[in-house]
Image (cartoon, coloured by chain):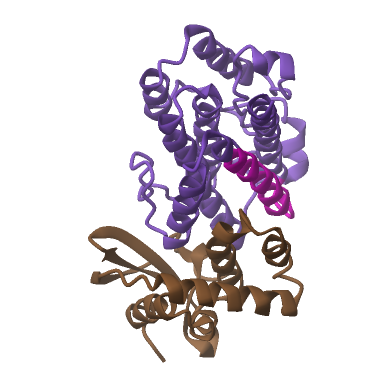
């Protein structure tokens, strides 16, 4: 199973190529939905139909699929490939960690939580040091 | 450790009454906020010290208030073990994320305020957003959430890429025109209201109480953005 540092590389590669399957598989579901919302926001300013779809991604699989397709096209068109460097892992407790790195020389951080046998998953809510372990 | 009932008994006490933060002072001076606006900010702070601040009316807002937030429940400036109930780890995670998310709104308003200096709505509301951050920050401290590695000084920079994406998108859209900037503000406040509503579910009473204050602030901001939009469209 990929280690968090490898997942950072997969995350950026997925964003660059618009690979939504890869993006979905490396995140916990809640973070994936948040990612769709963040990357869909731009289009939702100008496209009311898309905005309506985006508002339903949590409950409507067909809406989510359509949003994924549109965002994938958008990401492929933009094809951003920032330079990722200086990766280092920071433990945040027994079941979570952060990877600190630079994106085009700007400090960034992605947090991960361990999801049982599925291994590490990107988890935006896991950025806090948790000393006491899981709930 | 006492439960939420005990918290409710002391709900009239507030703790968010400290001096203006360096960030607030910086904003006040940077944007030459008129004295009477600063007075409104300080007045709200003092009111928070004595009791729960109620939602500020439109007339008061028009006079310059920015809807600062009171943080309620446990007494004193630090953690009060008599009244603070335990949060689950997931709830702590949520609070920590909200703390970082509040910075997005503040930073968007700072940036758009610099782009549209003639539009005072941004300058006024960013002060209030700073108080939102501080209110959530105080909650985080009460519940032992370490905030030391969140840099509030770096305006427009976010370590978490998803928050950077949100900020960049809002600023890009808001930069199209002053009207679009105001519409971005309207959207941020609507989103904030929705997020706070969801985040409050299952939280202890003192956290819910702070979120209610934040929502009142957001409603006030929403009114202000909508008035500014109407003014500009007219």
The purple one among the chains is: B
Extreme top residue here? B36
Picture quarter with the C terminus of chain B: top right
Give whichever of A113, A76 is nearer the camera. Answer: A76
Relative to residue A21, is residue B11 drawn left or right? right
Extreme front residue here? B234
> What secondary structure predominates along the stretch shown in magenta?
helix
Q: How many marks?
A: 0
Magenta span of residues: B183-204
Q: Is residue B176 above or below residue A33?
A: above
Q: Look at 59% across and 79% down and name the residue there.
A: A69
The image shows residue B109 at horizontal and vertical percentages of 49, 36
Residue B189 in magenta stretch: yes
Quadrant location of residue A62?
Answer: bottom right
Relative to residue B27, is residue A48 drawn left or right? right
* Apparent colour of chain A: brown
The image shows residue B127 at horizontal and vertical percentages of 50, 27
The image shows residue A98 at horizontal and vertical percentages of 37, 68
Q: Look at 58% across and 27% down and name the residue there.
A: B15
Q: Is residue A94 visible?
A: no
Residue A3 in magenta stretch: no
Q: Look at 55% across and 58% down and name the residue there.
A: A42
The image shows residue B181 at horizontal and vertical percentages of 54, 38
């Amino acid at each position: 199973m990929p280690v968090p540092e490898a997942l950072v590389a997969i995350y950026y590669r997925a964003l660059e190529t618009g690979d939504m399957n890869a993006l979905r598989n490396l995140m916990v579901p809640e973070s994936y939905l948040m990612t769709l919302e963040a990357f869909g926001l731009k289009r939702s300013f100008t496209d009311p139909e898309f905005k309506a779809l985006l508002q339903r991604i949590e409950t409507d699989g067909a809406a989510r699929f359509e949003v994924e397709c549109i965002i994938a096209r958008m990401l492929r068109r933009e094809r951003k490939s920032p330079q990722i460097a200086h990766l280092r892992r920071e433990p945040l407790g027994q079941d979570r960690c952060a990877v600190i790195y630079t994106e085009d020389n700007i400090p960034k951080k992605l947090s991960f939580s361990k999801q049982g046998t599925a291994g590490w998953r990107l988890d935006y809510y896991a950025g806090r040091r948790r000393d006491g372990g899981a709930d | 450790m006492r439960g939420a009932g005990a918290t409710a008994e002391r709900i009239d006490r507030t703790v968010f009454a400290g001096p203006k933060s360096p960030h607030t002072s910086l904003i006040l001076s940077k944007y030459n906020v008129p004295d009477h606006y600063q007075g409104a900010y300080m007045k709200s702070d003092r009111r928070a010290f004595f009791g729960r601040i109620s939602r500020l009316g439109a007339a008061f807002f028009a006079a310059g208030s920015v809807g600062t937030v009171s943080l309620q429940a446990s007494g004193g400036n630090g953690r009060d073990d008599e009244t603070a109930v335990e949060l689950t780890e997931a709830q702590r995670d949520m609070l920590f994320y909200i703390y970082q998310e509040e910075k997005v709104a503040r930073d968007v308003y700072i940036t758009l305020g610099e782009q549209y200096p003639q539009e005072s709505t941004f300058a006024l509301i960013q002060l209030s957003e700073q108080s939102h951050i501080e209110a959530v920050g105080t909650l985080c401290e009460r519940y032992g959430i370490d905030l030391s590695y969140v840099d509030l000084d770096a305006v427009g920079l976010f370590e978490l890429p998803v928050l950077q994406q949100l900020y960049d998108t809002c600023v890009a859209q808001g930069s199209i025109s002053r009207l679009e900037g105001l519409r971005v503000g309207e959207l941020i406040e609507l989103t904030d209201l929705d997020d706070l509503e969801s985040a409050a579910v299952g939280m202890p009473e003192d956290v819910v109480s702070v979120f209610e204050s934040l929502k009142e602030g957001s409603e006030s901001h929403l009114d202000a953005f909508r008035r500014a939009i109407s003014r500009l469209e007219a």
